[in-house]
Image: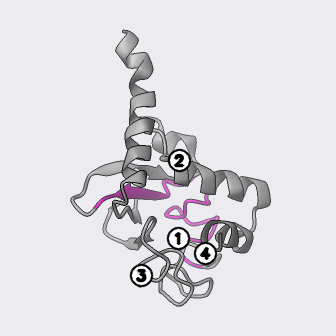
Amino acid sequence: MAILKILPLLFMIAASFVEAKGIDLLLFDAGTQTSFAGCLTCAPQEPDSICNESGSYGSRHLSKSLWNIHGPFGSKYSPDSPWNKDGAGLVVVDASGTVYGNFSRNPLSHAEQPPISSVRYMIELYERYTDLSIVRDLICER
């Protein structure tokens, strides 16, 4: 019974360890896991990085970007957007397909596995500022 109480903590520690080790964590739609939404932990100059201002996934203006408030991953009304408080959001995986949790404001979407620390931080920033431009600048321009 005691192991069940500490299991969520172990998941959080393992996920933080992955982030620290520099593994590329990729974002896909949570529903089908077929629509790529960018790389969460890639260097900003990488084409797939969510922080590459010129890239498909880091631009504030391109449709695939989670920073575009009108796109499927950036609109707070889209079920695939992590900013939708009722949607499934995105799933975080590595290149081998290991799942590290969901990126979503919806607490039901990550009931089995808590979100990794960088995802929690991004969600906290969004809930504080509700402006994706501010959240992007705080995450990517540090």
Q: Is residue 94 left or right of residue 116?
A: left
Q: Secondary structure at mark 3?
A: loop
Q: Amino acid at mark 4?
A: Trp
Q: Nearer the viewer, mark 2 or mark 1?
A: 2
Whether 107 is drawn above or below 128: the answer is: above
Q: How many marks?
A: 4
Q: Earlier in the sequence, mark 2 or mark 1?
A: 1
Q: Which residue is mark 4?
A: 67
Q: Are marks 2 and 3 in contact (CB under 8 Å)?
A: no
Crowding near the residue tagged with mark 2, few <14, some 14–19, many ≥20 C-alpha atoms within 10 Å: some
x and y, in percent, of residue 119 in the image: 54, 53
Q: Is residue 29 visible?
A: yes
Q: Earlier in the sequence, mark 4 or mark 1?
A: 4
Quadrant in the picture for the C terminus = bottom right
Q: Which mark is on residue 5?
A: none
Q: Which residue is mark 3?
A: 46
Q: Amino acid at mark 1?
A: Phe
Quadrant in the picture for the N terminus = top left
Residue that appears at 50% across and 58% down: 89
Query: Looking at this rendering, what residue extends furthest in the bottom direction?
Result: 54
Q: Which mark is on residue 73?
A: 1
Q: Earlier in the sequence, mark 2 or mark 4?
A: 4
Q: Secondary structure at mark 4?
A: loop
Q: Which range of residues does the magenta coloring cover?
A: 71-94
Q: Is residue 113 visible?
A: no
Q: Nearer the viewer, mark 4 or mark 1?
A: 4
Whether 78 is drawn above or below 98: the answer is: below
Q: Earlier in the sequence, mark 3 or mark 1?
A: 3
Crowding near the residue tagged with mark 1, few <14, some 14–19, many ≥20 C-alpha atoms within 10 Å: many
